Amino acid sequence: MKNIFKINALTTVLLVSLVFTSGCYYDQVVPPPEPEVPDEVSYSAHIQPFFDAKCISCHGPNNPSLEAPDSYDNIINGGYVNTTDPPSSTLYTVLDGFMGANVTSSEKEMVLKWITDGAQNN
């Protein structure tokens, strides 16, 4: 009887150890790769959808409207874009400030590329 008890106790300890050591396994969560910046950045195909997704919900009455069809005129005429020195453009620099946590590096690159390419209303 003592031998059976020792075998059952040993088996139980081994099974419990196995459960705790194997447990659930979770793969490390890897964020999806960022999309590449297109060769040609279009205002209507890339910049306005970016505004729609990331900016419109927070822009209040003290900020320029980023809703179509007024957004292009508001950022160009409001002095938010500097095609002579694109990295100094307010539209670009604000992406590193308050918005930085919400904007990906490829989105920042896309905005900078659009400004560098002349900030066309295309």
Image (cartoon, grey):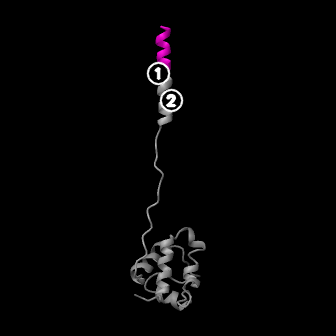
Seen at 49% across and 85% down, the residue is 115
Q: Residue 40 magenta-drawn? A: no
* Residue linked to disc 2: 17
Residue 23 x, y percent position in the rendering:
47, 37
Q: Residue furthest top?
A: 1
The circle on residue 11 is: 1
Q: Is residue 56 visible?
A: no
Foreground residue among 3 and 47: 3
Residue 121 x, y percent position in the rendering:
42, 88
Q: CA distance from mark 2 to mark 1?
A: 10 Å
Seen at 46% across and 49% down, the residue is 27
Q: Is residue 26 above or below residue 92?
A: above
Q: Is residue 26 above or below residue 59?
A: above
Residue numbers of the magenta segment: 1-11
Residue 99 x, y percent position in the rendering:
56, 72
Mainly helix, strand or loop, the magenta region? helix
Foreground residue among 67 and 47: 47
Q: Earlier in the sequence, mark 2 or mark 1?
A: 1
Left of 46 or right of it: where is 83?
Answer: right
Seen at 60% across and 74% down, the residue is 97
Q: Amino acid at mark 1?
A: Thr
